[in-house]
Each structure stands twice: as structure tokens, then as C-alpha cells.
Amino acid sequence: MTDLAAGLSLFIAIIIAWALLSRLRLARKVDRMIAFTGKIAAGDFGSRIASEDGGSLGILAENLNLMAGQLRKNVEALSREKVILTAVLKGMADGVMVTDAQGRAIIVNPAFLKTFGIREEEAVGRPLVEVIRNDGLLSLYRTAHERKDYASGEIETGFPEPMSFIAGCVPLIIEEGFSGIVIVLHDVTRMLQLERVRRDFVANVTHELKTPISAIQGFAETLMDGAINDREKGVKFLGIIESNARRLSRLVEDLMTLSRIELGEVRLQTRPVSLRDVAAEAAALLEPKAREKGVTITFEFPGNMPPVLADRDRLYQIILNVLDNAVKYSPRGESVIIAGADQPSGYDGMAEISITDTGSGIPPEMLPRMGERFFRVDPARSRELGGTGLGLAIVKHLVRLHGGKFSIESPVHGQTDSGRATGSRGTKVSLFFKSTL
């Protein structure tokens, strides 16, 4: 009996020990799984848990490993998408801001920051009404926020200069409901400027063509009505018809030249050319006109002035056009100065030719428009002197075609377009071309 009791006690002790050992092993496996899931929660998706048996815990371990691998793939995909989205937002010309449901900025791209002259740290996390001081945009935002619907409209900003935008506010609606608003700003400043130029061009070219055509038609009808029998009047009227026909021809020729340049049909044959020689040739052609007005043309070129890379015929056309304007608008008895400079300040690798007159000058607010088609400071006087209003536009296009620079300054009212104070009068047109040195 004693042996049976002892054996039974031993068996029970073995069972209890085995149960305790199994419980301890199970606790260790569970602890390893808890540590493993902790690593996953902390973002360590590279860790794996060993599967020691094929039981339920083994299956659970394998599933946890598969879950970690899948999570790693998902997180890597999300990271790539975030990098791509960030690059897209940074590279976009349109301004983009994303706000949360409370109106706080959570994403802002550089174009949006630049539009309003703010820094990212000043915008992210702050309410839109504290970041943006633009009534038009805020009004669109409130409309989209209240209606939970798309709102768009045109807004204007004044930083760093007056600009126009089409603003769109798109509500973010996801499973949880309204989550915020995406604001997109599309810059239409250039488009509106081009539309204004197009309208002005159509109006101006219509006017410019109408004037000589009306004169030709009117005097031709007068001649046909009997004035042709009066020799003195007939000759006078025919002279007027010829003058307007020439004006019409110049206008059409200038328009065709501009059109060819813009369409890329003008091909330059560049070679080393002396600025002084071309300027002297243009001055010789205009000398009779200058002498008739009592205007003196003088040259101020350094002795070692290097040649420039240019198409000689086009360079001659450029200088002749600018010089003709200078002589045309200079008062009687004044002078026009043609000057050259090598490597002027701010224009490394270039040579400059400037043509300066001592006329009445150009008001500062009109300087940015010089070179626009048909733009004239004094339209009536320009037409009276035979100008088409296209000369400087052609000059500007041809200079750019050469890869050069074009600028105008006029110290009228005591300052130039760059803000330098001066007491002189007149207009200075500067042309910069690539130097051969």
C-alpha cells in the first residue's frame, strides 16, 4: 500500500511539475509575443518571432510575422507616396494649402507661402484667418466651410507685386465626415496681361489701319469728285494719299517683321561685329535728318572696344531704329550721344551700346510699358512724326533673339527707373550683346 501511495504521489507531482513547466513555457512565449508586438508598435517591422512548434502558438507566431511583413510593405508604400506627394507639392507652380476641420493649416507648399510672403513655421498649425490677410480668399474659404461644397473665384494679391489668381476651395469629406479644406491658387496674372495686350493690340492695329485708309479713301473720293481738275489741289491731295500709303506700308511691314520674329522665322547669322562701325553707319544715314533739326550726333566709345557676336544686318536695324527715335524726339539744337562700354557693371561677358537723347523724357510709370506694341508716350506727336508704335517692340524682340538685354531709363521728374535721383532730362536706351572676349 505504501508503495502504491508513493507512486501515486510521484505521478501527481510529475503532472503538477509538467503543468507548471508548460505554463512557464507558455508564459515565456506570450512574453516574447508581447515584446514582438511592442516592437511592431514602435515601428520596427524588421523583427521576427521564432515559431518553435506547430501548435496554435506556432500558427499565431507565423501570422504575426506575416502581419509585420505586410505592415512593413504598407508603411514603405505610404512613405514613398508621401515623398512623391511632397515633391509634387513643392514643384507645383500653383499654391496649395490643406486645413483641418477647425481651419488650421496642416500642409502648405512653397508656392502658397511665396504668394503671401509667409514662412512655413508661421503657417502650419495656425488658423487660416491668422495666417492669410486676404478678404477674397477668406470669403471663399468660409463659403466652402459652411456649405461643405466647392467654392471658387478670382482673387488679387499685392505681394510681392499685384497678381491675380483663380482660387478653389475643395472640402475634404472622408468616412468620418468633414475633415478640412484643400485650397488651390492658380496664377492667371500672365494670362490676364496677355489678354489685355491682345485687346490693346486689336484696338490699336484697327485704329492705326483705319487712319491712313480713311485718309486715302477720303482724298481719292475728293479727287474723283472734281478736285483732280485743279492741278494745285490735285498734287496736294495725291501727296497726302502717297504719305498715308507709305505709312500703311511701314505699318504692315513692321507687323510682318514682328510676326516673323515671334514665329521663329528670323534666322540670325552671328559673327564678330564692331558696335561702333554699325552705329557710325546708322548715324550716317540719319545725318541729313539730324542736320535739318540741328541735332548733333556724338560718339563716346573706348579705343579697345571688342566686337560682339551679332547678325550685322539685324544689329544695324536695331541701332537705326533706336537712333531714329532719339533724333526724332530730340528738341532742336540738342544732341544725341552714342556710347559704348565693355563688361559694364552687372553684365559680365557682354558689351553695351547706349543711345541717349536730351528730350523731355518718359514718366516713370510708363517705363515698364516701353517696348509694347503700339505703346507711345505721346500718341499724337508720334503719329505726326511718322512713327508706327512698333519700332521699340521690334528692337526688344531682336535683342532678345540675340540673347542680349534691353533697358530704358529716363531721368524725367528727377529720377530714373532704377530710382537714382538726377536733375537731367532725356531718355537712355541701353542694348547689351555678348562680347567676343
Image (tube, rainbow, N blue to C red):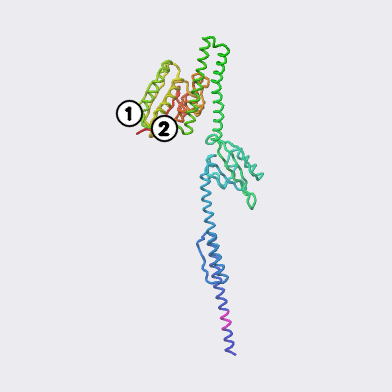
204 up-or-down from 234: above or below: below
Extent of the magenta region: 10-15
Q: Residues within 10 Å of mark 1 (few under 14, many from 20)?
A: few
Q: Examine the image and state in which quarter residue 166 appears.
A: top right
Q: Which mark is residue 304?
A: 1
Task: Point out the image quarter for the N terminus.
Answer: bottom right
Q: Is residue 247 left or right of residue 274?
A: right
Look at the numbered disc 1 and give the secondary structure of its residue: loop
Could you tell me the amino acid type at mark 2?
Leu
Q: Is residue 286 visible?
A: yes
Residue 126 position, x and y percent, is 58, 45
- Dot 2 or dot 1, earlier in sequence: 2
Does residue 141 sit above or below 323 in this rendering? Answer: below
Name the chief secondary structure element in magenta.
helix
| Mark 2 lies on residue | 268
What residue do we see at 56% from left, 81% from top? 14
Looking at the picture, tell me which residue is in the foreground, 427 or 389.
389
